[in-house]
Image: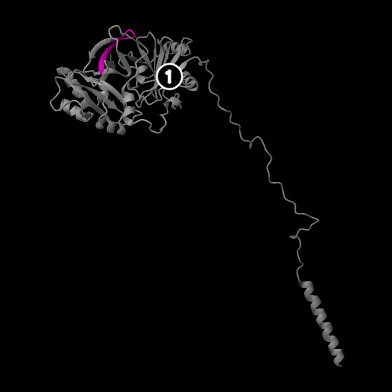
Amino acid sequence: MKKTIFFLLAALMIFVFCSCEKDLPAKDNSDIPTASEPEDIPETVPEETPENIPDEVPEEKPEEIPDVSHILGTAVKNIEIWNENESPSSDYVYELTDHFDRWKNLLFSPEISVLKAADAHDIVRYGEISLEDVEAVFRFLNGFEPGVFDENSEPNPPTGGGLCFGAYTNSGDEIWKAVYNGGWLIIHLAGDEKSFVYNVEGQNTEWPAFEFLEPEPIVSNTISAFEKLCKIYYTEPENAAFDTADYTGEIDTEKFTRIYQTEYYYSDGSDYQMFKADIKNGKTFSELIVPTDRFFVSYLENGEVSTMELTYTDGVYVFGMRFPEDNGERFIMPETPELSDLAKKLDLRTTECRNVRLIGYADGILMNDGQSEYFYVLGVGANSIDDMKNGDLLSSAELAEKMFG
């Protein structure tokens, strides 16, 4: 009996187990790759089509110009090209004439031997400039078109300086000269009574990266600031002959400088008032002086250093007045503590020094670096006030106060 019950229970358990196994879900092995069937990786790199191939940017080539390798390029002071006191008057161009075409025909004249370039602020590396810069100047100028002004234009040029260029023959005769100030192009042709101003706003608006416009790199100071100031003050004589018929001594051309004078005579009543008005209205003394054809030079005679005044006439420095007992003090920059200290304060890259005669008042050295202006008194005249004396170093404000009150 017991055996029968045991077998019935066992059979029942087997039946239940089999029924449960049928109800379980089947195991999914589809996510497990096998060695014989590697997983396929779809191609994701798109095919190159004309739409997604980037456009090739062609290299910009400089505009072709005639060969200018025979032309000597030199960076000079602005006054050597465009001297406002000697330059012809200018007319604004409202209607086109043949003037611009004449200039373009002369732009690459075979007679050009020298190209001079300058910045209106005289911030350049003076001396010979590279052939690349010479080519860049011609390419730059050749790109202009003859723009004109309209009736609403104001006759007031854009400010902020300008680039000046001049083309000359081997003998130094002008062929053409041009000034570009960012919006206007002023052109003068040799022999013309006037220059012409073209409206080139929007043409060649970016200042070219001429190497000669870059300031001189700062180098170790091998000479003192005062010696640098002296080199700025003493100007090299021009390439001309000296008339030594009346003088047999030794001329020291390293100490040689042009004499400037004021446009106004301090001792003249009407000039005095105009002089005073200009200074009061913000003009600098540097703006109110003009160069003369007279020069000072140091000379040696019997071992003594003295001063001689020369006149530049027909390419020759002609003997003028001698000042044998002034030890050169009439124009030589003395190494005083005041001037030595001032030299360290001035920006010597932009400084100009002039030997100036404030006519009827005083002689001295005028120094201007574009930010500050000073006057060192070398001598006083009959009209000078009592509290001004040789050796005074005055700011332009102090000089104006002493002169005009």
Q: Classify residue 125 as left or right of residue 54.
A: left
Question: Which quadrant is the C terminus positioned in?
Answer: top left
Tell me residue 27's x, y (percent): 76, 66
Along the viewing direction, whichever of 365 and 23 lies nearer the viewer: 365
Label 1: state its secondary structure. Answer: strand
Residue 332 occupies quadrant: top left
Closest to the observer, 163 or 300: 300
Q: Residue at x 17, y 29 (%)?
A: 401
Dividing the picture into quarters, in which one does residue 52 lie?
top right
Task: Sort mark 1 into few (<14), some (14-19) or many (20+) by Cα contacts within 10 Å.
Answer: some
Q: Position of residue 10 (x, y in %)?
A: 83, 84
User: Is residue 296 something that shows in the picture?
Assistant: no
Residue at horizontal 67%, vertical 38%? 48
Is residue 38 rendered to the left or right of residue 327? right
Q: Tell me if residue 202 comes above or below residue 295 in the rendering.
A: below
Write down the region rendered in magenta.
305-318
- Taken as a whole, is the magenta stretch helix, strand or loop? strand
Name the residue that disc number 1 marks. Answer: 74
Relative placement, left or right, of 236 versus 48 is left
Residue at x 25%, y 18% (from the top left corner): 304
Is 397 within the magenta? no
Quick one: 97 or 12, which is closer to the camera? Answer: 97
Q: Is residue 313 inside the magenta stretch?
A: yes
Q: Quadrant of the N terminus?
A: bottom right
**Residue type at tag 1:** Thr
Q: Quadrant of residue 217?
A: top left
